[in-house]
Image: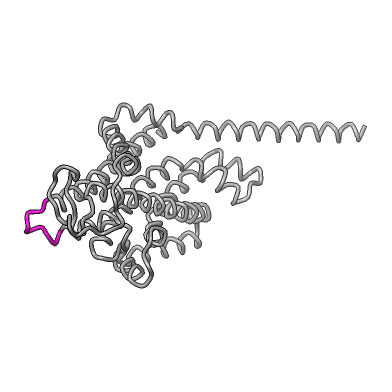
């Protein structure tokens, strides 16, 4: 009789555990309704977002596919053809070193976008983990981690980036790491705020009751359910990184020859602003403005779509 009761108790416990796991899975699936398909469906009704997405596709195609269709020599200086106005063979003229401006725009845009994307991914990865740990921990640890973020946010970003760029040789990877290393603070605060709201939801409480570790909570339940905020933040981070690269290049702390970026091109053209050589200034300035505008419009639309689906 006693063994029969033990078997019955074990079966009841097994059934309860299975029901708990099923309920947890259902709660998690219910929370994950903010899917990429639903976001894209909402974006179709956002004209500015669609315009930003289309403009971004054109910019990316111009920078990545353009050099394959319009081949120019961007390595050898040609002083005999320096500062030529737009004309046959050079639709946007040449710069003071004889480089074709249109080809230079494509090469500089490709590097700027690569740095922006790499810096955004690096910053978002650090900020997401940092913010998730702080938000889940709460209490003294959360307060300490956020005070560290507040202190670092008070440090002038451009000041330290200029020092590091001047001290170390600037290349695409190093610039990405430097910019990303100072850009994760905003991501950390955003993710921490999202985790604070998620940690009291039913699926997180159920996972806690079932004995899930903090690592499992963060990687399986919190970060996946905060992907909407993270994706929106990445888009803004890319725009900020493109502006940061342009600012460093304009101040003379960007990439070195023969690699080009939009900031150094703008700085080179600014010296001829009074010589009526508009093709050295307006095309590159327009590329920077259009790229950042496209990213911001798309990020705003994604934020509205994710927020609407979450509600």
Which residue is at the far bottom?
167
Residue visible at 46% across and 48% down in the picture: 196
> Image check: 226 left or right of 9?
left
Residue visible at 19% across and 50% down in the picture: 285
> Image check: 172 left or right of 291?
right
Residue visible at 29% across and 53% down in the picture: 74
- Comparing 4 with 77, the one in front is 77
Q: Is residue 307 magenta?
A: no
Residue 47 position (above or below residue 303): above
Q: Quadrant of the N terminus?
A: top right
Residues in magenta, as a range: 270-278
Please identify the quarter of the rendering in which residue 267 is found. bottom left
- Comparing 163 with 201, the one in front is 163
Q: Where in the figure is residue 80, as x and y percent of width and height?
A: 17, 58
Q: Where in the figure is residue 83, as x and y percent of width and height?
A: 15, 55
Residue visible at 25% across and 49% down in the picture: 105
Residue 222 position (above or below residue 143): above
- Comparing 85 with 107, the one in front is 85
Q: Is residue 276 magenta?
A: yes
Residue 142 position (above or below residue 46): below
Q: Where in the figure is residue 5, as x and y percent of width and height?
A: 86, 33
* Count of numbered marks: 0
Please identify the quarter of the rendering in which residue 257 is found. bottom left
> Image check: 187 left or right of 200?
left
Q: Quadrant of the C terminus?
A: top left
The figure's colour scheme reads one colour
Q: Where in the figure is residue 22, as x and y percent of width and height?
A: 64, 31
């Amino acid at each position: 009789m006693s063994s029969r009761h033990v078997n019955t108790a074990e079966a009841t416990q097994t059934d309860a555990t299975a029901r708990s796991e099923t309920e947890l899975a259902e709660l998690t699936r219910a929370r994950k309704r903010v899917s990429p398909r639903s976001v894209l469906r909402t974006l179709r009704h956002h004209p500015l977002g669609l315009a930003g997405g289309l403009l971004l596709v054109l910019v990316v195609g111009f920078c990545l596919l353009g050099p394959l269709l319009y081949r120019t020599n961007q390595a050898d200086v040609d002083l005999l053809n320096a500062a030529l106005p737009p004309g046959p063979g050079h639709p946007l003229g040449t710069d003071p070193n004889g480089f074709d401006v249109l080809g230079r725009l494509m090469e500089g845009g490709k590097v700027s976008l690569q740095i922006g994307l790499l810096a955004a991914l690096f910053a978002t990865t650090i900020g997401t983990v940092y913010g998730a740990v702080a938000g889940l921990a709460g209490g003294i640890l959360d307060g300490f981690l956020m005070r560290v973020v507040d202190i670092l946010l008070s440090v002038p970003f451009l000041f330290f980036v200029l020092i590091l760029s001047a001290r170390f040789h600037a290349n695409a990877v190093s610039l990405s790491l430097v910019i990303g290393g100072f850009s994760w603070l905003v991501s950390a605060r955003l993710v921490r705020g999202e985790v604070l709201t998620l940690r009291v939801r039913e699926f997180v409480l159920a996972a806690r009751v079932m004995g899930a570790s903090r690592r499992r909570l963060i990687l399986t339940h919190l970060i996946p359910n905060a992907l909407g905020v993270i994706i929106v933040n990445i888009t803004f981070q890319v725009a900020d990184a493109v502006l940061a690269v342009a600012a460093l290049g304009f101040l003379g702390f960007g990439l070195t020859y023969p690699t080009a970026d939009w900031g150094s091109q703008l700085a080179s053209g600014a010296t001829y602003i009074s010589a009526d050589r508009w093709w050295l200034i307006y095309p590159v300035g327009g590329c920077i403005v259009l790229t950042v505008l496209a990213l911001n419009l798309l990020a705003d639309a994604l934020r509205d779509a994710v927020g609407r689906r979450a509600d």
